[in-house]
Amino acid sequence: MDFVCNIPFISILLSLFSGTICSVLPGRAAKWVNTAVIVSVGIMSAILLVYVNGTQESFVYMMGHFPAPWGNEIRAGVLEAGMALFFCMIMLLCMWGGRKKLDEEVEESKHNLYYILVNLILSSLLALIYTNDLFTAYVFVEINTIAACGLIMIRQIGRTLEAAVRYMIMSLVGSGLLLIGICMLYDLTGHLLMSNIQEAVAQILEEGTYTVPLVITMALMVTGLAIKSALFPFHAWLPDAYGYSTISSAAILSSLVSKGYIFLLIKIIYRVFGFSVFHDSHIINVLFVFGLAAMIFGSLSAIKESDIRRMIAFSSVAQIGYIYMGIGLGTKVGMIASIYHIIGHAAGKALLFIAVIGLTDASGFSRSFFDLDGAAYRNKIAGIGFTVGALSMVGVPMFAGFVSKLLFAQAAVNNVGKLMPTMIVLAVSTILNAIYFMKTVIRIYTPAENTEFAVIPLKREKLYGVAVVLFVILNITLGMLSQPVVDMIRSGLEMFA
Amino acid sequence: MSRKKTEKEYQKSFAYYFFRWLNGEKDEYLGEVEITPKEPYRETEEEKRARIRGKRAIFLRLYGAKKTRAVRAFELFYKAASVVFCGILICLLLLTVSYLPPTGAADKPVNNEVSERYIENGLQETGAVNIVSGMILDYRAFDTLGESHVLFIATITVLILLRLDKKKNDGAGITAEQAELNDAVYEPKSDTILQTAAFILVPVIMIFGLYVILNGHLGPGGGFSGGAIIGAGLILYLNAFGFEKTERFFTEKTYKWVSFGALSFYCLAKSYSFYTGANHLENIIPKGTPGAILSSGLILPLNIAVGLVVACTMYAFYVLFRKGGF
């Protein structure tokens, strides 16, 4: 075994250990540890990606001295390595963009606690990406849930506390359903390792015993993960949690935490039940319908909102709907489109959150729509960032959002039964997206007549500017050079099965 | 009539106190226990109205919605719908359980090669007599590593929520000093019954906790349960003797460094065994003779580390909930 194969293990343990280290460091040192860990994990994941792309084979890594069904095991392929690299990039930029705001909004003595949360979120995301064992996945889902609550409430105002309580209740319902599902699946198959469960599931279907509990197990696990990633009817916790927490938390929650659960769901679909079993069950149609509903209702709620940050939060509901719609199409292209949208939406939504905070700061910290006139002139870099993010969300060519919409449309063509509803909802949702995003872009570029708000010079916020520029570059790269990414996802999905 | 003791001497003797106590003439503890019952909270009609008004104002400001008839109707519908939904979910789950393989059947899918190897080879492969310990700390140690970090992250979030800053006071909250004063008012001081009971119980609890931790690889027990017992003992000690006594050996610094030390030992030790295991290198940690106290390789030190983390977490939770700081 090559030394490179140790990288998944090293990245999980490094980020876990750095959380422990940060607990005894002062805030400033913890900040550097955090940055160093994210950067080094990102570099290692890039090396791993190159290696796996060369061999074109996934590998399993034994966690301990005992082979798989007895001991723990993690697994890495092209898709896993690519996701790890991408999550690290987004997380680093989110932390940079929100750094100044974090210093203002969070008490000095609690800064190191914030970096502990971020490190542990990173490690749990990596574990969710690499895991090959359902129970390991559940343990790290727990870490992810609790740390996300901490991210929401570390800025202690009334609304964030309420949002954290809501998030916790909904998220624990999701965890509970997932856990019940895992327990029943263990009872039916006698295994926790993904590949063994898949064999046992195939056997169950062949013999025809236990098919009823199998379908219910599948439904429970899918529902649990859908609640945790805020699919449409379960999205009530989302606007407050994203709208009032400190800005790096909002960006990390919307672009990484919920995406980690969706990635786990895709992994479960492919590696636990098998894609064809999932495709033949009717759960896929339920996901499809709720995905379509989310695309419409999320956008409608966003149009009604006059608070800009809550508007962006509601737009997340719509975008999560796109991802579930792609999964619900039940074709391979649909799955590729969903995973591409996970990436594209993460890059766009994090950019929007980071850009919005610059605009509201330039408008006297007011989040109301009516104070934002001309904000893009007062904080130029934030204005550019917001425009790029909005164009990407709407799906204008050259930006990341366009590619995923194109892929969704292609995927719908492969599935004749679901073609019409997909196309219609896709068109309607794009128009609704355009309504509220373009409205905002026009407003921030409308010169204000007599404004008392001062211009924020770029010199004062160097790190913020760098983060926004890198986000913009990332978005345009994803939009222009989409083919390598799509190829990577395709070969990664082939390694899954 | 002769008396061996004068009246004055008699009043100092044990018999005098005993008979007075027996006849109910004097309460020995009167004046020694500082606990004073709080006035029961009574709300006047005026205050009640003000409270309801305030609540409505907050609701209006937060959500910008008045409780109109439509909202009320929706709330009623919401409650009814949630009850119906929960009923359906319960029925569905019960129905599913009836389809599951029967408990205790020999041909149940869970009775497969996995549990077979745990039971048959567990002793030779891990060196632990207690199969459960061998399983959670050796076979599936990665899950347990995650689980102890769940505890760690839970303490961190409670710290974020409840720790009060020494200096800052943002108007609504209270400072650490005020919390200290509040604690002094509301908590009993030098309660003799509690102190006597704690004096007897705490050493026993501590020793039992240590036994459960150290014996984890030989019999029922382990780090999680033993740590919880020790944490409970610490909380009892704190309640009986107050913060002044506990602060001599347990401050925030102690908590920080003990849990840091335990978790980093856990992390590093397990990283070593993961690394050697995956790369098929020799593990130099000896297994020892099964049944001896120093046996089963890393399981004993790991149990100690987990026990320390759990005990510190329990104690820290209690302290934070009581006065928002150590």
Image (cartoon, rainbow, N blue to C red):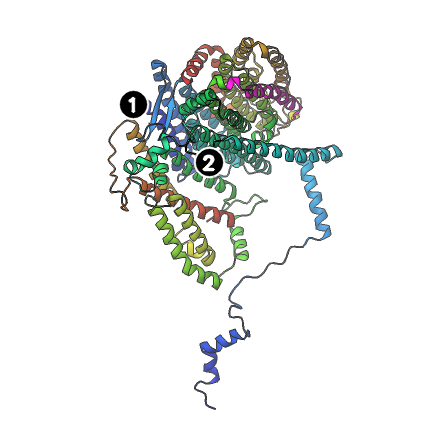
Query: Does the magenta run of residues contain A305?
Result: yes
* Placement of B317 over or under A173, stated as above or below: below
Q: Nearer the viewer, residue B71 or A249?
A: B71
Assign a secondary structure to mark 1.
helix
Q: Quadrant of residue A39?
A: top left
**Mark 1 surroundings within 10 Å by alpha-carbon count, few (fewer than 14), some (14 through 19), many (20 or more):** few
Q: Quadrant of residue B111?
A: top left
Q: Nearer the viewer, residue B137 or B272?
A: B137
Q: Given contact means CB atoms under 8 Å apart, are the residues at marks 1 and 2 in contact?
A: no
Q: Amino acid at mark 2?
A: Thr
Residue drawn at (34%, 35%), measured in percent from left and top? B118
- Residue A460 placement (x, y as % from top left): 50, 27
Residue B103 numbered mark, or none: 2
- Residue B227 placement (x, y as % from top left): 40, 46
* Placement of A327 over or under A62, stated as above or below: above
Letter of the chain that mark 2 sits on in the rendering? B
Q: Amino acid at mark 1?
A: Phe
Q: CA distance from mark 1 to mark 2?
A: 45 Å
Q: Residue furthest bottom?
A: B1
Have a look at marks 1 and 2 and say if they share a chain. Answer: no
The residue singled out by tag 1 in the image is: A3
Magenta segment, principal secondary structure? helix
Q: Quadrant of the N terminus of chain A?
A: top left
- Residue A480 placement (x, y as % from top left): 48, 10
Left or right: residue A350 versus residue A447 is left
Letter of the chain that mark 1 sits on in the rendering? A
Q: Nearer the viewer, residue B13 or A455?
A: B13
Residue A29 visible in this rendered orientation of the protein: no
> Range of the magenta residues?
A278-306
